[in-house]
Amino acid sequence: MTHTMDQVRRLLKQDDLPGAVRSLRPHAETAPIAELAKAVRALADKAGFKDLADAARKAAKRPREPQALYDFGYACVERGISFLAVAPLREALGLLPDSRTLLAELVSALEDERRHAEAAALLAGRGDRLPAWPETYLLVHNTLFAGDLDTAERLVTGLPEPEDPQWAPARDRQARQVLRSGQSRRVQRGAGHPDPFGPADLRGWHYGLTGGLLATLSPYGWDAGMTGRYAYLGDTHEQCRHGLARLGLALEAAGTSPATVSLLPGRSDRILGLAAAAVLGLPAVPYDPDRTDTLVVAYDLNQADPDLVRTLHTRTPGQILAEHATCWTDPPAVSADFSTLLCQYAVPPWREDERPEEEIARDVAAADPAPDGGDGATPPDPDGAFRTFAAGVAPGWLTGPRDRVASPGPVSSSRFA
């Protein structure tokens, strides 16, 4: 750890705070707590995070005191470095094994790190002593997101209604996720998917967890850790046009016919919305949150006005939300009903194009809708397979609020650190 501290100091002197944080990841659960806390204090001082610096200083002095360890772990979670919270919280829970507060915070840290199987095992280890709310609810959540649908279905049926009304929305959201996941698995099995709801069924899990249809799978890097997602995407007119073709298939398969295309105010949103209107043969109108029977088109919801995006959480009758490039590492505030693709970072094809939006939209509408052939390693994903899936889940599609889902679930993909 001494070498690591030297590395942290060197990177901080170079003003490379992200690099200093990354340098601690390999040691986050093996280094002595006191040494880890000293390193985190140096990071916090550099970043100006007084709360984290104070908590780290106290933990370095009292690495066996549960309160100091809890405060340190809690501050790490709050500052978005949950991987550094796991060790102190686990140590504190070992000292006070019956603490529900420590258990909940450790589960939260593991969830932030997408370590759902570990969180589920930690909770399940309490056996019959595990309270219903929120602990068993969290067990269901992490069991589902770890990929064990059978156990999640069994557990959720025995979860009573919460006495505290603040948990009611969470209960309803979880019930929808489990129900959709079961529906999605049945559809995938019936369609002959080679591994329905397995660790590579990205489309099936995406629908189960978010309620949205995933139109395409990345044709690159499937066997190199991407499993259908993109990390960096240099987008093209053809990719956008292929997404619009799949959108038309989804609407047809679900038997739904929006009357208009609603244009969000962002430049990329307007370009794609105008292209969608041309492809689908619908009039384009300005976005109005109260407009019914309309298709709202977004390029990337993370780039839209947050206040506007919040109006899309509650579903207006007949309103369908289609997003082209959905960020899977930092999901938007609402889950789109339809996503062309999942990526970490996307560059729109018109970023350097200063022509009027209408001209670019015409180019998109006229582009070749054929899919990118990719590197040849991605399993086939023909239009028929997508249409079958969309038709199969249609009874549950476009129902309920568009809840944000922070975790990518049980299908893992490589990402930029």
Image (cartoon, grey):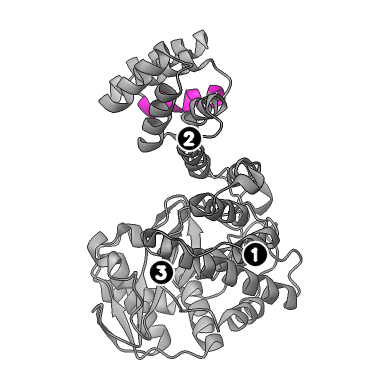
Q: Quadrant of residue 184?
A: bottom right
Q: In this rendering, would 311 be left or right of 69?
A: left
- Badge 3: few (under 14), some or many (20 or more) residues near its Cα, within 10 Å? many
For marks 1 and 2 on the same chain, the one whose residue lies earlier in the sequence:
2
Amino acid type of the residue that numbered disc 2 sits on in the rendered structure: Leu
Q: What amino acid is labelled 3 in the image?
A: Arg
Residue 275 visible here: yes
State how far apart marks 1 and 2 are (Cα): 27 Å
Say few, some or many: other residues with alpha carbon within 10 Å of mark 1 (under 14 / 14 to 19 / 20 or more): some
Residue type at mark 1? Glu
- Residue 315 or residue 138, whichever sits in front: 138
Which residue bears the numbered disc 3?
A: 402
| 100 and 23: which is toward the camera | 100
Q: Residue 162 in the image: x percent, y percent? A: 46, 61
Decide: marks 1, 3 in contact (CB < 8 A)? no
Q: Which residue is mark 1?
A: 153
Magenta-colored stretch includes residue 74: no
The residue range painted magenta reads 17-27
Which residue does the image show at 62% across and 77% down from the upper left? 389
Q: Position of residue 309 (x, y in %)?
A: 29, 65
Residue 32, compared with residue 265, is above or below; it is above
On screen, residue 371 above or below 412: below
For the residues carrying marks 1 and 3, which lies nearer the camera in this image? 1
Is 273 drawn above or below residue 210 in the view shown?
below
Q: Nearer the viewer, mark 1 or mark 2?
A: 2
Asked if residue 57 lies left or right of residue 285, the reply is right
| Residue drawn at x 36%, y 31% as measured from the top left | 75
Residue with the mark numbered 2: 102
- Asked if the residue at tag 2 contacts the one at tag 3, i.e. Cβ–Cβ closer than 8 Å, the answer is no
User: Is residue 18 highlighted in magenta?
Assistant: yes
**What is the crowding at mark 2: few (fewer than 14 residues within 10 Å), some, or many (at least 20)?**
many
Give the residue at x 48% y 23%: 23
